[in-house]
Image (cartoon, rainbow, N blue to C red):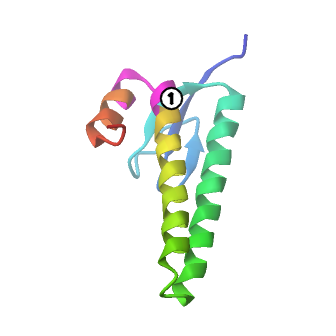
Amino acid sequence: MTEKKRYFITIDTEDIRETSVPDGIEYEVYASRNEINEIRELFDKKDQDTKNAVKYLAKPFNEWGADHERQKYDDHLIMIFRRIYDMGTEETKANISELGIFN
């Protein structure tokens, strides 16, 4: 069985720490090393989506491409919240539920 440890994840700064640093909105989870690596991979994918969407700024009439990249960004962000919710404490689950993003 994989050992789970307590982590604090801040989505906007993409920080994953073992100690709480309440300098932003952080979510407490219990996760294995593999689950934390999965969150890091999702952060990387979200960052790549951001870079891809920026490419369309120079092409103002190519909204389809920009919309596609924005949708991929949104999808990855929701996946991040879903995984954090699944691993989260009751307080984390309540805080994420209040956001209403899984409706």
Q: Residue at x 53, y 64 (%)?
A: 68
Q: Nearer the viewer, residue 84 or 71?
A: 71
Pointer 1 residue: 29
Instruction: Name the residue at 55% across, 57% down.
Output: 72
Direction from residue 23 to residue 77 in the image, left or right? right
Q: Is residue 5 above or below residue 78?
A: above
Q: What quarter of the picture does the C terminus occupy?
A: top left
**Where's residue 49, x and y in %?**
60, 63
Viewer-proximal residue among 55 and 68: 68
- Examine the structure image and report whether residue 87 is included in the region drawn in magenta: yes
* Left or right: 81 as drawn, with respect to 3: left
User: Which stretch appears magenta?
Assistant: 85-92
Label 1: element kind: strand
- Which quarter of the figure has residue 1? top right
The front one of 69 and 13 is 69
Q: What number of labels is visible?
A: 1
Of residues 16 and 48, the one nearer the viewer is: 48
Q: Which three-letter amino acid code belongs to the residue tagged 1?
A: Val
Q: Is residue 36 magenta?
A: no
Residue 59 in the image: state x and y as whole percent: 55, 88
Vertical comparison of 39 with 55: above or below: above
**Residue drawn at point x = 49 percent, y = 64 percent:** 70
